[in-house]
Image (cartoon, grey):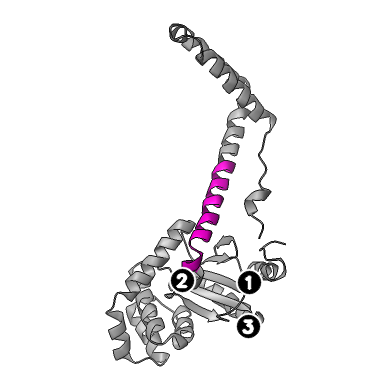
């Protein structure tokens, strides 16, 4: 797989060349003996001030370059996280798997039961699974929208623990239900999916939910995720409900050339 960072080329516009020239000048001035440095301090400050007043675009160019470097560094860190956390991201024993568990292409979705965008994006996921028999979808409970979301996620983990084969039905009932998702509505959705309330309550007394959610929070923090839905597909981290077309295109590209962009 091609490293996306290989496509990044150093930028060296004329203004940046002027910055480098200015830095070289300053270094040469500061290289004089200590006694002379104090005498030349005012002159150095004057040179810098006059230069920036004559070439104010240098500041804008420098900030643009700084932004580019920061984004490149963030992308490099994200790629490293994907490599270091691949097993727990794609194959955790605590995650939910829909679609083909042995699929060659994996789509990971971080979601919240109270996320309106997640509700609308659910149809995209269903359609992708129906159209791609080789697609493995991993769902990560990422409750970020308050106490109700946390309660719903805790019930969801219990459902997956005692009846993973019924999680899909439960998930759809709760995610697409009206009103606030919380402990009450989540338990109701679980009962509607055929789970026994006694078994559910017993499972909820364990620390499995806490460990599962903490695992997801750690992953999300390393990947820089701040909201839902967020996706990981191949080496791409996609934030927001980008829609069926964009996700489908990335899946097709992975299948055709082992990259999300061919």
What count of labels does the image hold? 3
Which residue is found at the position 66% from the left and 27% from the top? 17
Which residue is found at the position 64% from the left and 24% from the top? 18
Going from N to C along the chain, the mark reached first, 2 or 3, is 3
Q: Nearer the viewer, mark 3 or mark 1?
A: 3
Q: Which residues are magenta?
A: 68-89
- Left/right placement of residue 233 relative to residue 253 reads left
Which residue is found at the position 48% from the left and 86% from the top? 169
Q: Circle 3 sits on which residue?
A: 130
Q: Circle 2 sits on which residue?
A: 140
Q: Nearer the viewer, residue 106 or 116?
A: 106
Residue 117: tell me if it is visible: no
State whether the magenta stretch is mostly helix, strand or loop. helix
Q: Circle 1 sits on which residue?
A: 244
Q: Is residue 86 magenta?
A: yes
Question: CA gap, disc 2 to disc 1?
Answer: 19 Å
Q: Quadrant of residue 214?
A: bottom left
Which residue is found at the position 54% from the left and 73% from the top? 120
Q: x, y percentage for residue 172?
A: 49, 82
Question: CA gap, disc 2 to disc 3?
Answer: 20 Å
Q: Secondary structure at mark 1?
A: helix
Question: CA gap, disc 3 to disc 1?
Answer: 12 Å
Where does the C terminus fall, quadrant-wise? bottom right
Q: x, y percentage for residue 72?
A: 58, 47
């Amino acid at each position: 797989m091609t490293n996306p960072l290989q496509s990044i080329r150093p930028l060296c516009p004329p203004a940046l060349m002027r910055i480098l020239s200015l830095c070289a000048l300053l270094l040469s001035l500061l290289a004089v003996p200590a006694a002379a440095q104090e005498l030349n301090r005012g002159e150095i400050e004057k040179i810098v001030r006059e230069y920036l007043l004559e070439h104010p675009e240098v500041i804008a160019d420098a900030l643009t370059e700084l932004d580019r470097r920061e984004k490149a560094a963030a992308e490099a860190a994200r790629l490293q996280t994907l490599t270091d956390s691949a097993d727990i991201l794609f194959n955790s024993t605590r995650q939910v798997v829909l679609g083909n568990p042995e699929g060659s292409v994996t789509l990971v979705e971080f979601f919240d039961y109270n996320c309106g965008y997640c509700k609308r994006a659910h149809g995209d996921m269903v359609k992708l699974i129906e159209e791609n028999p080789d697609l493995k979808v991993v769902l990560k409970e990422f409750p970020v929208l308050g106490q109700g979301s946390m309660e719903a996620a805790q019930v969801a983990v219990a459902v997956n623990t005692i009846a993973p084969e019924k999680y899909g039905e439960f998930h759809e009932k709760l995610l697409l239900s009206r009103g606030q998702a919380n402990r009450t509505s989540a338990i109701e959705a679980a009962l509607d999916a055929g789970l026994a309330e006694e078994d559910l309550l017993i499972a909820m007394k364990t620390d499995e939910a806490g460990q599962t959610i903490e695992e997801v929070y750690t992953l999300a923090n390393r990947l820089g995720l701040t909201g839902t839905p967020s996706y990981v597909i191949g080496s791409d981290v996609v934030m927001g409900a980008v829609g069926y077309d964009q996700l489908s295109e990335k899946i097709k590209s992975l299948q055709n050339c082992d990259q999300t962009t061919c």
